[in-house]
Image (tube, rainbow, N blue to C red):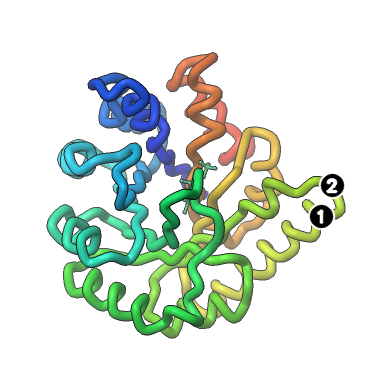
Amino acid sequence: MRLCVNIDHFATMREARGGLEPDPVTAAQLCELYGAEGIVCHLREDRRHINDRDLRLLRETVKTKLDLEMAITDEILQIAIETLPDLVTLVPEKRKELTTESGLDVIREGEKVAHAIRLLHENDIEVSLFVDPLDEQIEAAAEAGADIIEIHTGEFANARSEEEMLEQLDRIKAAAAYAKTLDLGVNAGHGINYVNIRYITAIREIDELSIGHALIARAMFVGLPKAVEDMLQRVRGF
Ligand code: PXP
């Protein structure tokens, strides 16, 4: 299982003052230096954190793997094609949300999603779809031509009881196993932290994790190198 770090919140903090620091590009370099196997950033339509300059510099400097999270809009698709990230993760985006709230509805938006995937594939960019752990969505993702799904782990992470958490975990396990039968790569993300990660790492079908908030929150207290190393230890199970 690989650890990819979402660095958006370094840019969130920078934007709080509208200056230059902290620079998410520096954060990405440190994450890689301390073992992260990929860097994730979300270029939102409203540019509330990561901006075009960040993406450009990240493309020039990330040495592991750059995963661009994005909504399907003509503008952002054009930027993706010009930037050539290693992976694009398509997500739904709402202006007022604090963070991505749910998976893509690939069943309802099948044609739009398939069109975006075709465009990205024509430019040799792999495509992952952020979906809820539902068989119908996973089937639709495969039909639309996705290479990978990223399973939305938010409901698992936000469960209010152990029973609910285990129920959500079962859904994630079943979704990961089903996706593999359809030859899809399996990523997972949203709300994964230093405690709940042990349930997720037990799911062997998951290839890659995308983790942001918990890691950056810990970095504020212990420093980014240690926050990355602590998470890597958990991902690798030692
Ligand atoms: N995956 C997707 C698609 C996301 O939108 C996010 C949040 O930006 C993450 C993973 C990371 O979630 P978190 O910040 O809760 O670790």
Residue at left 54%, top 76%?
Answer: 138
Quarter of image, res 101: bottom right
Q: On the rendered structure, is 58 left or right of 31?
A: left
Q: Nearer the viewer, residue 44 or 178?
A: 44
Q: Position of residue 91 (x, y in %)?
A: 42, 60
Residue at left 29%, top 79%?
Answer: 115
Q: Position of residue 174 (x, y in %)?
A: 68, 69
Q: CA distance from mark 2 to mark 1?
A: 5 Å
Question: Is 220 placed above or below 65 here?
Answer: above
Q: Secondary structure at mark 2?
A: loop
In the picture, the disc for residue 164 is: 1
Quarter the C terminus occupies: top right
Q: Are marks 2 and 1 in contact (CB under 8 Å)?
A: yes
Q: On the rendered structure, is 177 left or right of 53?
A: right
Badge 2 density bin: few <14, some 14–19, many ≥20, Cα 10 Å: few
* Amino acid, disc 1: Glu
Q: Is residue 234 among the parts visible in the rendering? A: yes
Q: On the rendered structure, is 46 left or right of 5?
A: left
* Amino acid, disc 2: Ser
Residue at left 66%, top 62%?
Answer: 172
